[in-house]
Image (cartoon, rainbow, N blue to C red):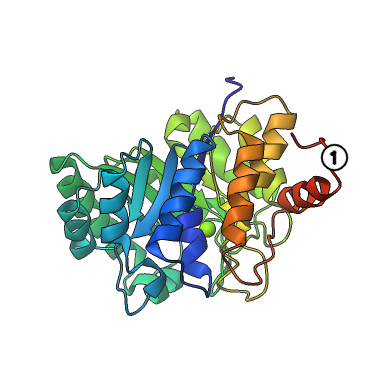
Amino acid sequence: MSDRIEIFEVGPRDGLQNERQILSTADKLALIEGLNASGLTKIEAGAFVRSDRVPQMADSESLHSRLKANGFRGDAYYLVPNMNGLERAVSVGVKQIAVFTAVSDSFNRKNIGMSVRESLSLIREMTESARREGIRVRGYVSTVFGCPFEGRITAHQALPVIEELLSLPVEQVSIGDTIGVASALGVEEVIKPLVSGGSVPGIAVHFHDTRGTALANALRAFQLGVRTFDSSIGGLGGCPFAPGASGNLATEDLVYFFKEMKVETGVDYQSLCETSLSLLGKMQGRIPSSRALQAYQANCEKNSVWDS
Ligand code: MG
């Protein structure tokens, strides 16, 4: 087992999309470049979605053009829901996109107005077009462990959707605990069959810390061989289905956890925390849900060197 993991940073998209405050393009650029400087190379930067529905992502074209003009050296990913989104991505020279579906039909219909089956055939079409354009594709599967409308989801329900996505020309499939209900046992039930099928390099996990179980789930996934973990700076994002509750696992918590286990993350912890604090300074009243970042901030005030 390799002692190195890769962190896929989703804060600038999955995080900021679920925050009330809309950040300026300049602030997003500073954030993305700060994340990259701290060692994060794969960053979900924006989304080509309807700006009337998701105003937080309305500047994705200009954001990507400015990242390119600044010579951004990481891989910037953009969420794309349909062919129109893909055309917008192509028009500004995007090289990495993310497509998404879910295990449960009710969630998928509310989210994108189509069944899981319909979305999988759309994704098939999109991945083929993307490949012709030389664009790499990452796939997300939401509601793998539970659905806000249908309740508990079993591995038996989830695996066929994950396996179908893995059979398409995608570089990776990210397994999402959309409402933060997964347990280490549930993680094992989904991941083990995929590992024994030889899919590990193509698997990422996207845990939410809604009920405080995200790190335990990450550890279980790591033990089973998973090496790519999604997380969001500062824990930005909240839980869209439980207002006030935590959402995305915080990158600081994930980096702290693995660095203390001597697992290489490629991320400089102190530089990451400073990037978070500088971002939060621009977001009025936003308290980090990251426990590690709260401790970092408190220790800095006391001049403790524990975190450095
Ligand atoms: Mg998320």
At label 1, counting other C-alpha atoms closer than 10 Å, the crowd grade (few under 14, some 14-19, many 20 or more) is few
Q: Is residue 185 in view from this perspective?
A: no
256 w.r.t. 246: above or below: above
- Please name whichever residue, 181 or 129, is drawn nearer the observer in this view of the structure: 129
Q: Residue at x 24, y 48 (%)?
A: 94
Which residue is identified by label 1?
304
Residue 80, percent from left and from top: 30, 58
238 w.r.t. 257: above or below: below
Residue 29, percent from left and from top: 41, 53
Residue 270, percent from left and from top: 66, 38
Q: Residue at x 69, y 65 (%)?
A: 287
Horizontal placement of 60 versus 305: left or right? left
Place residue 138 in its image quadrant. Answer: top left
Q: Residue at x 39, y 44 (%)?
A: 163
Residue 223, percent from left and from top: 65, 31
**In the picture, which quadrant includes the N terminus?**
top right
